[in-house]
Image: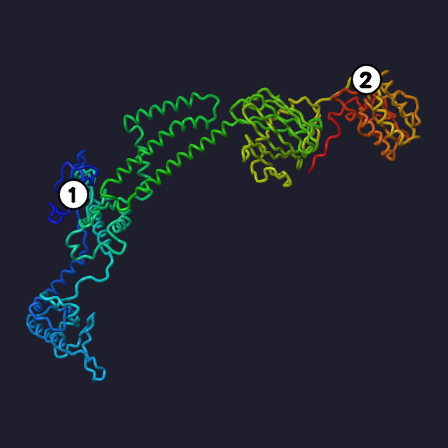
């Protein structure tokens, strides 16, 4: 049963906030206590409301006692019954907080008015400064003054500390009491009323913490109303201060109660004398609480209504069909297809959830700290997250769907002179009309290779081409790959280091600022700055199948440690067969002009000429002999000694190293004249001081005399010499740097 003051407060609250429960009430009345009030909303929801006074009891107790004491003095004095002295306008009493005894009341009154009359009769000092001074009253100033000398007035001295007298000019108001006590007031802080509200709420929380009134009375909501009453208005300090009002007070209360146990669903502060009469101080909508509420509402919004069920179900079907319908797509492409369908739907549900959360938390009374800005920030953050997720997936989709090619070189140098470059493809799509340009950055040599089509999947052993580096084992390349679908560029370093091959490469697709593929082997010397900050090893990007070397049609290959592996033995056709292919070999006038300066440089020296093969080779040897005979002593062209029959092309032998300059001069002349020859000379002591010119049949295009051993003047029959077996390399194998 509500008390009168509670009923008054409840009716005033209901008039101010008729929809405090989020809906209009169908009925309300006294509750079983607790709760004090039992309400039923139009939806049938039952709400219980407990009431408590918002007062500071100590202030009320102290104020009531003081008022009774002062009233007992004023009832005896009755100053309004006495004429006001001529010069005194008001007298304020400062008592010793003693109750005025009945036997002292009449004497106290007589002495008080006698003292006031005495003070009023005290003359002012004369205006003439020449006249002798007289005692002047201290209170005859605009602000008045104290009188504490009660000599001759023992009853006043017993009950009063002092009196304060104001001149009549200051207080000249006839017909009202002119003897009184100091009015209540002075400095104060509204903190006492903040603490009073917190104290009253926490008392109720503690009282009902273990009682489950929701279940007991089938309540959907159990609220607390803390109301400001008339006693607080009369005897408590105000709730206002400098730049501090009821809204600020409610916010401080809400801040203090935010972590208290949830006994009440909502707690209201009600002040009937404020313009905004009620605030909801619990629950306090902190940023994280709002986020949890928003996400919870968002999660419950899917398939919540008939319209949502149609949209969500249709989106799910479209996404699933799209997911399985896409062919040759990466995982990111499939995931992106789901995201493009669901991202707008999730955004719609998120906005709808924000609106519902806003309506729920904005229902009157208003919360102490309005969460609108926080809720807006969370909506922005969630939408931003959704947008960033979509952007990230879109970029991942582009990267995963992006198809490009790059070159991976063989680890071995084939036949000590050339390297195989294999085409590797990354991505799910087929590239058509592919053109790969490989440039040796040290020599500027360029080769272009075309492929009709390159399919995704494992490396194909037939998609490669050959290139002869200008600086084997210390190679620097630029690769440009264009196709109908894409364009990419690659910078590649190949270096032999510590008996192993090391790589560094960067591949850029579609001229993007950052490389799509980047790697660098750890032991690559720091002088190579390509991908200097890259920590990824090139072991995987440059990896070739283990059996790829066996698919190449080569006779030998050099390993990074300098060793050479011979895969198969190579032999030349017989000398007679080679001789038949040499019928068109003759010295041209240009070749003679290139050779004569070198021949004349060592005029008079002796030259011996040997040939091997048939009549075509003999004729060619005779032409050379006649040219040399212009400046040198020559013998007749003779057949090679036994064992040297398989020599090819033109070769030179000298008898000692003192003839090295002469031999090199002749070799350079052969090079300038375009005569196929062995690029280095041999030394045979049996030649004495002569120069020996060996002329053999013309070798095939894919063979070189550098692959053969050197002929000997005293060859041993039956022992393999010169080109019986050819070396399985294109010449002298290069030195692999340490």
- Quarter of the rendering containing residue 267: top left
- Residue 3, horizontal then vertical, whole percent: 11, 48
In this figure, which residue is indicated by the disc labeled 2?
Answer: 582
CA distance for labels 1 and 2: 122 Å
- The disc at residue 15 is 1
| Nearer-the-camera pick, 255 or 237 | 237
Q: Is residue 178 above or below residue 19?
A: below
Q: Secondary structure at mark 1?
A: helix
* Residue at x-position 86% and y-position 32%: 662
Question: Seen from this angle, which residue lies furthest front?
Answer: 128
Q: Which residue is at the front of the view, 193 or 549?
A: 193
* In front of the other: 255 or 362: 362
Using a 10 Å C-alpha cutoff, classify the residue at mark 2 as few (fewer than 14 neighbours), some (14 to 19) or many (20 or more): many
Residue 504 place in picture, x, y as percent: 61, 35
Residue 116 on image: x %, y %? 12, 74
Residue 325: x and y, percent? 43, 20
């Amino acid at each position: 049963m509500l008390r009168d003051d509670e009923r008054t407060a409840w009716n005033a609250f209901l008039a101010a906030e008729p929809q405090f429960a989020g809906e209009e009430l169908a009925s309300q009345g006294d509750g079983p206590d607790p709760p004090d009030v039992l309400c039923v909303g139009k939806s049938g929801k039952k709400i219980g409301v407990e009431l408590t006074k918002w007062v500071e009891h100590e202030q009320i107790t102290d104020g009531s006692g003081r008022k009774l004491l002062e009233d007992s003095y004023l009832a005896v004095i009755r100053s309004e019954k006495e004429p006001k002295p001529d010069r005194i306008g008001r007298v304020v009493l400062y008592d010793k907080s003693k109750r005025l005894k009945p036997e002292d009341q009449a004497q106290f009154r007589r002495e008080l008015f006698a003292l006031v009359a005495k003070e009023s009769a005290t003359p002012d000092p004369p205006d003439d400064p020449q006249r002798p001074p007289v005692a002047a009253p201290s209170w005859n100033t605009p602000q008045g003054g104290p009188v504490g000398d009660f000599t001759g007035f023992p009853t006043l001295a017993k009950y009063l500390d002092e009196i304060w007298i104001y001149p009549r000019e200051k207080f000249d108001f006839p017909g009202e009491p002119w003897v009184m006590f100091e009015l209540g007031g002075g400095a104060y802080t509204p903190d006492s009323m903040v603490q009073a509200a917190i104290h009253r709420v926490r008392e109720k929380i503690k009282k009902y913490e273990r009682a489950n009134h929701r279940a007991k009375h089938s309540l959907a909501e159990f609220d607390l109303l803390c109301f400001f009453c008339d006693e607080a208005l009369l005897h408590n300090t105000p709730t206002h201060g400098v730049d501090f009002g009821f809204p600020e007070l409610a916010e401080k209360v809400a801040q203090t109660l935010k972590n208290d146990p949830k006994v009440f669903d909502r707690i209201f502060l009600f002040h009937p004398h404020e313009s905004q009469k009620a605030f909801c101080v619990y629950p306090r909508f902190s940023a994280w609480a709002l986020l949890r509420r928003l996400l919870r509402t968002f999660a419950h919004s899917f398939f919540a209504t008939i319209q949502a069920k149609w949209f969500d179900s249709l989106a799910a079907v479209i996404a699933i069909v799209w997911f399985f319908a896409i062919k040759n797509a990466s995982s990111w492409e499939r995931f992106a297809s789901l995201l493009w369908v669901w991202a707008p739907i999730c955004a719609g549900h998120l906005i709808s959830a924000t609106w519902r959360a806003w309506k729920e938390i904005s229902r009157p009374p208003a919360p102490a700290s309005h969460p609108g800005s926080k809720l807006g920030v969370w909506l922005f953050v969630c939408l931003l997250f959704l947008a960033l997720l979509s952007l990230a997936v879109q970029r991942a989709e582009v990267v995963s769907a992006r198809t490009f090619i790059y070159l991976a070189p063989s680890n071995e140098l084939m036949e000590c002179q050339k390297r195989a470059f294999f085409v590797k493809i990354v991505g799910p799509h087929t590239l058509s009309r592919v053109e790969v340009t490989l440039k040796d950055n040290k020599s500027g040599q360029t080769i272009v290779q075309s492929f009709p089509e390159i399919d995704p999947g494992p490396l194909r052993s037939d998609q490669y081409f050959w290139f002869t580096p200008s600086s084997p084992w210390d190679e620097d390349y630029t690769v440009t790959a264009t196709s109908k679908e894409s364009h990419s560029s690659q910078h590649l370093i190949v270096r032999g280091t510590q008996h192993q091959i090391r790589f560094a490469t960067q591949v850029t697709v579609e001229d993007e600022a950052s490389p799509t593929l980047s790697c660098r082997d750890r032991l690559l010397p720091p002088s190579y700055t390509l991908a200097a900050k890259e920590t990824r090893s090139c072991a995987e990007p440059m990896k070739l199948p283990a059996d790829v070397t066996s698919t190449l049609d080569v006779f030998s290959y050099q390993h990074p440690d300098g060793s050479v592996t011979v895969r198969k033995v190579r032999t030349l056709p017989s000398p007679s067969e080679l001789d038949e292919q040499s019928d068109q070999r003759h010295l041209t006038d240009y070749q003679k002009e290139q050779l004569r300066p070198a021949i004349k440089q060592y005029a008079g020296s002796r030259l011996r000429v040997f040939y091997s093969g048939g009549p075509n080779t003999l004729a060619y040897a005779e032409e050379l002999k006649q040219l040399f005979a212009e400046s040198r002593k020559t013998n007749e062209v003779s057949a090679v000694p036994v064992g040297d029959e398989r020599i090819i092309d033109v070769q030179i032998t000298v008898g000692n190293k003192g003839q090295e300059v002469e031999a090199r001069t002749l070799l350079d002349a052969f090079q300038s004249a375009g005569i196929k020859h062995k690029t280095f000379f041999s030394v045979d002591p049996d030649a004495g001081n002569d120069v020996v010119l060996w002329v053999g049949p013309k070798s095939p295009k894919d063979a070189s005399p550098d692959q053969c051993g050197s002929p000997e003047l005293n060859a041993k029959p039956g022992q393999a010499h010169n080109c019986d077996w050819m070396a399985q390399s294109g010449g002298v194998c290069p030195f692999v740097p340490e």
